Amino acid sequence: MSQSSLSTLAEEQLTLARATGSGRSARTVHGGPGNVLRQTLVALVAGHALQEHASPGEATLQVLRGRVRLVADDRSWPGSAGDLLVIPDARHALHADEDAVVLLTVARG
């Protein structure tokens, strides 16, 4: 078993995101080849986004810090620290309304 401090890793990723022109940073904390479950910390600086992309399959976003908006088609779901958002099976984008860190969990089939 391995253990990680999501609070510490979130702060590290947010620091990295603030230092990049893209305003984002990510780190896989669990999963990889041969694993069904993959969890990735994604940090976004306020005003930045993960542009529209295809759904990764069954997935959720747990907001660890800040506020985000998950957008798909003509719908939008706000999320703030402590919220769990289910990613729709559609192209979608993620916008940071303030500096934010989310834990993306994907079950690969």
Image (cartoon, rainbow, N blue to C red):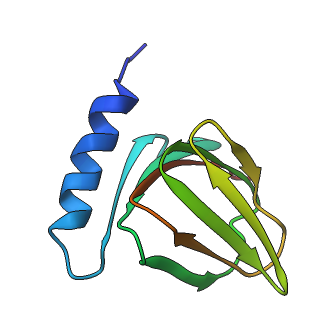
Residue drawn at 42 percent across, 77 percent down: 47
Q: Give the vertical position of 88 relative to 109 (above or below).
A: below
Name the residue nearer the viewer: 6 or 64: 64
Horizontal side of 98 relative to 57 (left or right) equals left
Q: Is residue 85 visible?
A: yes
Horizontal side of 19 relative to 28 (left or right) equals left
Name the residue nearer the viewer: 72 or 99: 99
Q: Residue 25 occupies which quadrant of the picture?
A: bottom left
Q: Give the vertical position of 80 relative to 7 (above or below).
A: below
Q: Give the vertical position of 50 relative to 98 (above or below).
A: below
Q: Residue 44 occupies which quadrant of the picture?
A: bottom left
Residue drawn at 19 percent across, 74 percent down: 20
Q: Residue 63 occupies which quadrant of the picture?
A: top right
Residue drawn at 30 percent across, 73 percent down: 23
Name the residue nearer the viewer: 28 or 8: 8
Q: In which quadrant of the rendered image does the N terminus lie?
A: top left
The image position of residue 85, as x and y in percent, is 74, 51
The image position of residue 107, as x and y in percent, is 70, 47
Horizontal side of 80 relative to 27 (left or right) equals right
Horizontal side of 40 relative to 16 (left or right) equals right
- Residue positioned most to the left: 19
The image position of residue 83, as x and y in percent, is 68, 41
Q: Is residue 33 visible?
A: no
Residue drawn at 51 percent across, 68 percent down: 97
